[in-house]
Image (spheres, helix red, strand yellow):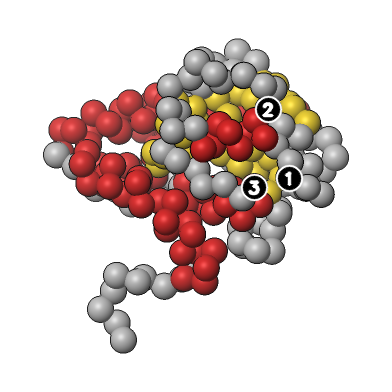
Amino acid sequence: MANHVHEGDLPAGLFKSAASVAIDSETMGLRLGRDPLCVVQISDGGGDAHLVRLDRSKYDAPNLKALLTDPAVLKIFHFGRFDIAMFLLHLGVTTAPVYCTKIASRLARTYTDRHGLKDVVRELLGLEISKAQQSSDWGAAVLSPDQVAYAASDVLHLHAVRARLDAMLEREGRMGLARACFDFLPARAALDLAGWEETDIFSHGA
């Protein structure tokens, strides 16, 4: 198991044989349009994590963009709505197909309101992950070892979490509903960027 940091883009062909990859991102904040996308971290579930520290002057990352849009590779997120919107805004690509463990958790784990990644990993995998570096300076020229370890932890367990949640969704008869939600995520992200971030367009309100 190792963590790898790449400057500007992924190496060509790095995930060419992967059927699915876990993806997360780090930004300077959580406000679309204000806070830049700084780091994207990826794992194919084999124990290694690859972090891309993006060049924010141009966001020229063709290999990363190709992976995000590859129809043969499922992209697994936890709260993918934000990451997908960031990728659309800064990288100019629509990420698909996608799977979101937070949506899956909300549909499968209806006995709790604790759907953060730390809580889901603790219950389903019996592991503890640290969120201590969540609010650190991701725009720094050099990532600290603690930042690298934190970013990696956000993707290293998502394949295993997905497997556990899939079993629960199948058991509860909600897999079809979950897939429909996943398929809608890129459109939900586009709505966020278009100004409907705080609006429930499906509500009956005036």
Rendering coords of residue 87 (x, y %): 59, 48
Q: Quadrant of residue 178?
A: top left
Q: Quadrant of residue 140?
A: top right
Badge 3: residue crowd in 10 Å (few <14, some 14–19, many ≥20): some
Q: CA distance from mark 3 to mark 1?
A: 6 Å
> Which badge, 1 or 2, is on the more N-terminal residue?
2
Where disc 3 sits, the SS reads: helix
Name which residue lies at 63% across and 33% down: 64
Q: Is residue 114 left or right of residue 68?
A: left
Name which residue lies at 54% across and 37% down: 68
Between 195 and 114, the residue placed more toward the observer is 195
Residue 23 shows up from this direction: no
Furthest residue toward right: 141
Residue type indicated by callout 1: Tyr
Between 52 and 157, the residue placed more toward the observer is 52
> Which badge, 3 or 1, is on the more N-terminal residue?
1
Rendering coords of residue 175 (x, y %): 22, 38
Where disc 1 sits, the SS reads: loop
Q: Which residue is mark 2?
A: 10
Rendering coords of residue 41 (x, y %): 62, 33
Residue type indicated by callout 2: Leu
Q: Which residue is mark 3?
A: 91
Q: Which residue is mark 1?
A: 59
Residue type indicated by callout 3: Leu
The answer to whether the residues at label 3 and label 1 have Cβ atoms under 8 Å apart is yes
Where disc 2 sits, the SS reads: loop
Badge 1: residue crowd in 10 Å (few <14, some 14–19, many ≥20): some
